[in-house]
Image (cartoon, rainbow, N blue to C red):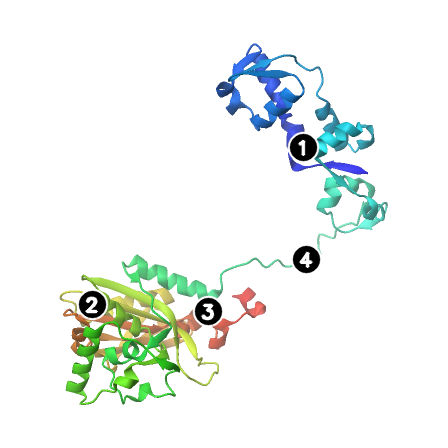
Amino acid sequence: MHYVLTDEGEKYLEDGLPEKNLIMVLERRGGKAQISEIESEIDNFNIALLWAKKKGWVELKFNEIVLLKKPEVFPEEEALKKIKERRSEEVDNNLIETLLQRKLIEKVSFEHLEKLRGKEIISLTPELIKTGFWREVCFKKYDVNVPPAEIYRGKIHPYVKVIKEVREFLIGLGFKEAKGPLVEINFWNCDALFMPSDHIAREIHDIFFIEGEGKITRKDVWENVKKIHRENWGYWDEVLAKKIILRSQNTAISARELANAKKFPIKIFAIDRVFRPDVIDAKHFIEFEQCEGIVADENLNFKHLLGYLKEIARVFGGKEVKFKPSYFPFTEPSVEMYVKIEKFGWVEAGGAGIFREEVTKPLGVNLPVLAWGLGLGRLAMLKLNVDDIRYLYSDNLSWLRSV
């Protein structure tokens, strides 16, 4: 049987056995010392004291250690040296058992390594180094002109990285991140945003409906929204408002945050997944990430909104930004933002506007509220230079390694 040193055995051979170091410290201090005085000087002090007492080298008098005798040799240290030099057969069996008990050595078998003796090998393994058997084999000459195997390190998914960059940028602008449920009540997704019950975007081909009915905990907001719908649209479907859906827009989070806000001003953003029925192809997917943001404060105006949008465009490398008038049920005025990105030209980035009073007042807010929603998937495709949205959720290693 053969033995090799463990990591602890290697350390003791290099730095000295703990009990040997204790004896040397006591000798320097005249043969005795308080535990508190020398404890910090010796690594593994408790082990040192245990073995020194066991061998009769020291005795403990209250908190004082007294040196009884200084050994001329330290058998374990000599044994470790011989085992290191592959001379295990010269070490006494009782001493071997002690070293095994102290976990300073471990048994190894060379049977499978013996087959390599004198043969040519390609790789130097930890086992060959640890056992010293590398001396018994031949190494094949290495051609430095042969390219090595490529190593791929782990990294953050490129789409996740883009999302993190946007999140960190908005936090840097003083925004607080908000979260909301993926399974939402139709009320917060549509009705609280002044979207009429018969709006075409509320059909089954535009929203995923789930069986069941949700509960409205804010009765005051429910009554306010009911009133504003009946005054303006002349009709409100309360059954439809209570239906459970998969959230189709993160503006639902904004509605919840405004209704629950205790004090103003507030600056809130949300980056989360939304769901919409669609035919999956290179440009469309049934779920995607949307970046929603709102700012509520006194004296805000449309110019402030455009300023925020220009800042956000910078995250995606947009050197120029332009705006086009648009329409959304819950904002007035409304715009669509276009960002000029190198290689792609002008690209639609998302919609924005100022929440209508029909949205804010039922939620208990009497301040201007700037709002925007950006399709992160589309902007990420441009930044990552891909033309298929499915890449953003891909586990294709070839593509992930190339980005």
Helix, strand or loop for disc 2: helix
Q: Name the N-terminal-most of marks 2 and 3.
A: 2
Residue 304 marker: 2
Question: Which residue is label 4 attached to?
Answer: 147
Q: Which residue is nearer to you in this view: 195 or 311?
A: 195
Question: Which residue, as the protein is rendered here, is positioned at the far top?
Answer: 30
Quadrant in the picture for residue 65? top right
Helix, strand or loop for disc 3: helix
Tell me the amino acid under the disc marked 4.
Pro
Q: Name the N-terminal-most of marks 2 and 1.
A: 1
**Horizontal and vertical percent position of residue 49:** 59, 23
Question: Which residue is label 3 attached to?
Answer: 384
**What is the distance, in whole Å, between disc 4 and disc 2 at their CAs?**
56 Å
Is 255 on the left or on the right of 154, as rendered?
left
**Horizontal and vertical percent position of residue 171:** 31, 59
Q: Residues within 10 Å of mark 2 (few under 14, many from 20)?
A: few
Q: Which residue is nearer to you in this view: 369 or 312?
A: 369
